[in-house]
Each structure stands twice: as C-alpha cells, then as structure tokens.
Image (tube, helix red, strand yellow):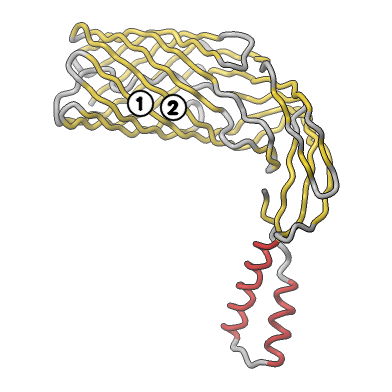
Amino acid sequence: MKLVVPSGAASFFIVYFVSYYVHVSEKGKMRIYLTLTICVSLLLLGCGGAQVQRGSFEALVPDAYTGPTFAMDDDSSAWKVNVSIRNPNDKHVHLKEIWNDTINGFEYTLDPVAGDVYYDFKIFPVAASIDYFGKKTFLLGGIGFGLDPFPYVRVTAGINERYFELGAFASLGLAKVSYSVYAPYIDDQGNMAGAGTSSKGVIECDDCSEWKYNGNFGFYVNAFPFSEFALSYSFSAFCPWLYNELQEYPLTFDFPYIFSNYFGGTYIINNHYLVSLGANIHFGNDFKETIWNLELKTAFIF
C-alpha cells in the first residue's frame, strides 16, 4: 500500500475560507494548514500490486560466518578483522515454481499466473568484516560490520568454551541489486471509504536496479581438538530481497531463501592470526541445482 500525498491547494483554500470569517493569527493559519494536509494525506491511499511473469533477480550471496573461531578467556573481549577470498561464481539459477496470486483492483483484476523467475546467483571474490566479541563466564555476545560488497551489520550470541563454541547470528544488509523483469501491474488510488480508481500497465526492463534490504541468519559450531586448530560448521539462510516490492508495487510471492552449509578448518597462530579453508554449499527448496564455492579466510585478533 502506497501513501498518496495530495497537493496542499485544498488545505490552503480551507484555511483561507476559515480565516476570512474567524480571526486567526499567521501561526494559527500555518498550524491549521499543516494539520489539514496531514489528515487529507492519510485519507488518500494507493494500493494494487504487480505480477512477475518473467524475471531475473540478482542475489549477492554472503560469505560463511563462524563466530570467533577460537577459545576466549573468561570475562574478556576481542576484535576480529576478517578477509575472505572466494572463487567467484555467476550463475543463472532457475526457481522451480513461483506463483503470482490474484490482484483485485477497484476497476481491474489480474488473474493468478505462474512466473518464470531466475536468481542471478553471484559470489563476490572478496569480502571483509570486523566484529567485536565480549565474553562473560561462558556466554558470548558480538556485534559487527562488513562489506560483501555492500554494507551490512551483524549481531552474535552464543557460548564459548575451551574445547568448543556454538552460537547464532543475524545480519541486515543494504545492496544495489539489478534485475530484468516483465510484470503487469494494477495501481489503485482510493481512500479509506473504499472508493477509488484503477490504472494498469507493465513494468518491463532489461537492466533495472534498486536499493534493497537483505537478511541473513543462522548458527555455527566450532570444535577445538587442539589449541592451534579448529573445525567449523555453519548454516545460514539468506534472503536477497527482504521486502516483496518491485518499484513500490507489492508482489504476491515471497523471494525464496538461499541456504548454505559451510565446512572448514582453521589454523590458529599465536592466538592472534587465523587462517581458514573451507567449502560452502548453497541450495534451496525452490532451486533446481546446488552451487558450491571454496573460501580462504585470514583473520587478525586483537
């Protein structure tokens, strides 16, 4: 639903009419004008939606996250600066079934239809992040920031012990993603009383882009069989488009999650340097194939 902000002309004439018969100060006129404009704006609403009949959407898949990946001392804190190098990947992945539901407008209707939709699956070759971890007894908390290649913020919570650690994480990012699409739409302009008009059209472009929020969450498990070595596993669920909108028109389907399994090992040098190597396997319930990549990570602890 879109808010339609009207012209202030109507509010201006109402204020002029009232002040003609009732003495109102200039400050009072301004207050009345602003109040009327806000009220009228809230009463005028836009709605509708779009159906993606053909589309290809960029999905910038993040690198694997494994938390601190070393045993921290009790009641201590640490910073971790990490750089990941990955073999780049750029694949056109077909989604099994995307279904556009019915869109009912004031004057027009779009019947349900299947969508032929792809993810432009992309893995950027370099990613960097910095995280701050604090440990109280065995409890761990963390907050971080990264670039992959666009910015994101991350929070971590878990436990950290001498021989193992496990935790959960969530991140929120903002990225400029590209897409190609053919999507009929209905644009409704109405009010809270239920009256209004509709227009319809088609969003059609071969190289569009928008700034979109993305989300990633999951968990990790690390084992420390030796003081200089760690074995890691992490699982994540990534959504490249958190809000299902296309050029401000709501969509009737959810963008599917990309799931990732990471398996790796880390060599710990003097408790300050980490060198990791692992494989990340990407899949999804709506995918027709599995994609994997290698990741080499180097980190500095201070």
Taking the image as shown, residue 43 lies to the left or right of residue 143, namely: right
Residue in view at x 14 percent, y 27 percent: 74
Q: How many marks?
A: 2
Give SS at disc 2: strand
As drawn, the label of residue 110 is: none
Q: Quadrant for residue 241, please give it.
A: top right
Position in image of residue 210 (x %, y %): 64, 36
Q: Amino acid at mark 1?
A: Ala
Q: Nearer the viewer, residue 127 or 133?
A: 133
Position in image of residue 156 (x %, y %): 33, 30
Residue in view at x 46 percent, y 34 percent: 172
Q: Quadrant for residue 15, please give it.
A: bottom right
Residue holding disc 2: 217
Sequence order check: which comes first, mark 1 or mark 2? 1
Which class describes the residues within 10 Å of circle 1: few (<14), some (14-19), or many (20+)?
Answer: many
Position in image of residue 222 (x %, y %): 29, 14
Residue holding disc 1: 168
Quadrant into which the C terminus falls: top left
Residue in view at x 19 percent, y 6 percent: 226
Taking the image as shown, residue 63 lies to the left or right of residue 66, namely: right
Q: Is residue 28 above or below residue 174?
A: below
Separation of disc 1 and disc 2 at Cα? 8 Å
Position in image of residue 211 (x %, y %): 60, 37
Q: Is residue 296 above or below residue 109?
A: above
